[in-house]
Amino acid sequence: MADMGGSGLRFGLLGPLRAWYGEQELELGRPQQRAVLAALLTAGGRTVAVPVLVEGVWGGAAPADPRKAVQLAVSRLRTAFRPYAGDDPQRMPLVRVGDGYALRLPGAEVDTTAWEALLREAGRLREAGAPPGEVREVLRRAQRLWVGEPLAGLPGPHAEAVRAELTEQRISAKEAELELDTDLGDRTDLTAAAAALALERPGRPRLTAVLMRALYQAGRKAEALAVYDDARASLPPGEDGPAALHLRILRDDASLLPAGATAGPVEPAATDGWQAPDQLPLGLPDFTGRTEEAESLTDRLRTAGGRAVVVSALDGMGGVGKTTLAVHVARRVRDRFPDGQLFADLRGADRTPPEPGTVLAGFLRDLGVDPGEIPPDTGERSALYRSALAGRRVLVVLDNAAGPGHVEPLLPGSPGCAVLITSRHRLTGLAGAHQLRLDTLPPEQALELLTRIVGADRVAAEPGAAEEVVRACGLLPLAVRIVASRLAADPALTLAALAEGLRHEHRLAELSDGERTVEASFALSYRRLDAELARAFRLLALPDAPDVPLPCAAALLDRTEAETGDLLEALVDLNLLHSPGFGRYGFHDLVRAYARARLDAEDGAAGRTAATDRLLDFCLATARNADLAARKADPTELSLLDASVAHPGRPVADGAEAVRWMREQAEVHAAAIALSCAEPALPLDRAAELADRMGSVLAERTRTTVIADLAERLAGEAEARGEHGPLALACYLRGAMLWHVNRYAESEREIRRAVELCTSPATERVLAKSLLTLGGNARVHGRYAEAAEHAGRAAELFRRLGAERSEGSALGEFAFSAAQTGRLDEARAAAERGAHLMSGSGPVSAATGRYYLARVLRLCGDPEAALAHAVGAREEFAALQVTVFAAASGDLAARIHAEAGRWLLAVDAAEAVLPLARRTSAALEAALLRTLGTALTGLGRPRQARACLTDSLELYERLGLQEESAQVRALLAQ
């Protein structure tokens, strides 16, 4: 009895009738005794005459001596109250009054009383205009009081009448709660909850409207309209609520959506796990000048909350201080954005800046969206991002943008948000943006910056030299900061000597523009570094990544982490590096360009190759450790080409740390792979295996296209070099990644090429993985005999290699396809063995084995066993946040229910996982819509069923799945 608390006597009617005294439950006896008690409880202390009790408990089937039956029931109930009353007749709550009985319970707690009080509170709050979320929470507290059917199992007209009244109250309260859910747009299972209740209670106008609006918000407009068409005949005469809503949906009335959202395939509810990001870099304690610009930007950002998103774009040449000013202003106004601040370095000046889709994936994860629910398409990610920010007040800082197209997908849609952008180019194509050009510092501000870093006394002692220094720096803050840091680090260095050094560097470079002026300051500081610092400065610039973590930096430098940390922190102190996060180090892009030039000049090809070799060795060794921790992978799977590594790698404690490490180092890993491709002296086997480990550990659709592109580059380089093993692995990996995003035709071409290349024992492991994926591809296209052959060959290879988990997975694939061809006994045995092999390889593998077994048991004519395994697997996948398999298991359970004619359960199971499928797999979404269409047909909802089947057919045709398309066409033709 939630939300009731207290002590003394407590009664529960919102479920089976129960009573407690303190923590002791009272024994209330037989159903008729309980029915008498229920009649007295609901009288609220009033006397109930014996004839009324008889009629309420027995109705037209009264016992021979009804008065005696009531007396006997009362006597036994008094015995039940003995723990409370003891031998004191004054404490006995059940008393005789005239020709009846009353239950006097001062201070006792009854759950129906609490229920009614909460409903009144919700009504009062709604009338007072309280926030919808506050009203909804009161209704949810009320719903938590329920434990089952009210007065379950009690006989008689009275119990039946109370049951009906309470149930109606509950449904009305549930309708109100669902309406608030649609207003707020923050519930992932809204369509499932609304559909289940609407099907259970047809003909309710309010509930019909809730379901229509929920479907419309989920981007299922055709189904929303069909719900009205199916329900119209059963609605009460004169009820025009659903009809009016039908017209508004036809007109795409934007007010039907939650604030700031857009109708589409991405449900706003993906933000249930909202977490406020706090990503702004630390500001500089010695920030100087730019008062007018800072005030202008601050005033602009503080106006956020009007009718449009505030966008400010700050442009200027490299080194002019755009990022410093943007961060300074953002930190000044952060209190205006209580829902968080997002920051991304878009690296617009780099050779390969990150795609907007990659940045969006990071933002969505930081906003609490499960990685498995992030769609692969940039447009869909952008829609989900805008939905996540709907109604929020978030500041987004986009640093170093390449152009308008680089930032447009990253702009929120909620008027409460604001965006601050920096770029080297004026973003004239960005509609509605406030543009601000940042020039070099005025001479007095540049001199003030120098003074704040080196000290007023030194500047006062050599004022002329100080002015010459800042002018030699081109009045650029980055250059002034670097030379000033050099001066501060060397008390013996005079300003005059520094000015002479800058004159010398200018003469050497024949400088003529701002960026070359900055380069002179780099050169002056670089030449004063000792050999170890200079080497660290050069080598850290080798990977083309925004920043490098300390362990990877230590591998690059071939030093311990402690030694490397000391070196890099010294470079940070000299402003030659920056540290965006604990243990991570990066360059300003102009500084990186200078460091790479020094690397080419001083270390040459041999130095680059050696550093790349060390980085690649460390990254692959640690990736193998991560794979082992994340998946309990078979040893043979950890190295498909048996590439040797000298470094033991960083230890990885568990799966969560493994995913975190691989996700955070993804750009460093991509950079290491790119370096390997550019180093002919290094074989490509380690680079190919590193890309494969990325695909294994980062089982997220946000990464698949990135990894597929890496594999394509590896394949091109391996083919040019004639390295068949890395080429085969790269082809397999690209095919596997394409398969996961439903690009089946391309996937099959790549996998078949991999199979053709695997002609030696050295590529046997790659062959086994390729055959398994090829079998999955054939299965998707309904070529079951071919699929069984490929999967069977893969299982045999894995068995010979001693890879039990992989053998179990292959057996699961084989079993399903074999069952489809009628080899049922063989299929069942293979599925059971596969589940057994996978059960000892970690929770994800165990759940996968159960899912594979459930698929086969269904085909073998054992639906109830199949259902038990499917539901169990779905729950396990949901707990493990393996979204795509949770959706697949839910689809299987829904299909089993539909095949058994359990239409309501089928709809409930399908709706529960459809939002997951919409964000992870178009093929699964199509399958669930087909199941929904079948179940809705069985429920007599032909128009809604047809809408589901039409959407399913469209998806199947887009994916090129001909057999499934034909099956859905047949259903539509019925």
Image: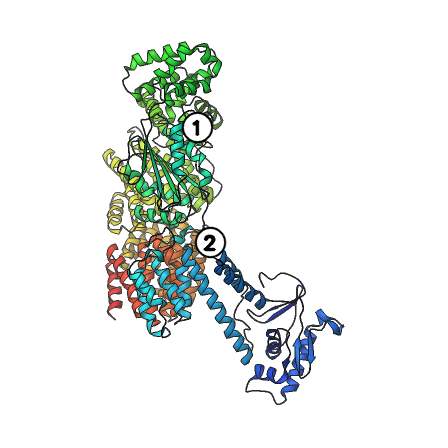
Q: Which residue is mark 2?
A: 879
Is residue 729 positioned above or below 166 on the image?
Answer: above
Tell me the quarter of the picture where residue 291 sits: top left
Q: Is residue 356 left or right of residue 341?
A: left
Residue sticking out furthest to the right: 87
Residue 971 x/y as whole percent? 27, 68
| Quadrant where the image shows the N terminus | bottom right
Left or right: residue 335 versus residue 102 is: left
Q: Position of residue 721 (x, y in %)?
A: 25, 33
Q: Position of residue 328 (x, y in %)?
A: 43, 31
As drawn, the label of residue 554 is: 1
- Kind of residue at disc 2: Ala
Q: Is residue 237 left or right of residue 452?
A: left
The relative height of residue 958 versus residue 863 in the rendered view (above or below) is: above
Q: Secondary structure at mark 2?
A: helix
CA distance for labels 2 and 1? 37 Å
Q: Is residue 359 above or below residue 872?
A: above
The answer to whether one can see residue 762 in this image is no
Which one is earlier in the sequence, the residue at label 2 or at label 1? 1
Q: Which amino acid is tagged 1?
A: Ala
Q: Which label sits in the foreground, 2 or 1?
A: 2
Q: Nearer the viewer, residue 799 or 502?
A: 502
Question: Dot 1 lies on which element?
Answer: helix
- How many callouts does the rendering have? 2
> Quick one: quadrant of the C terminus?
bottom left
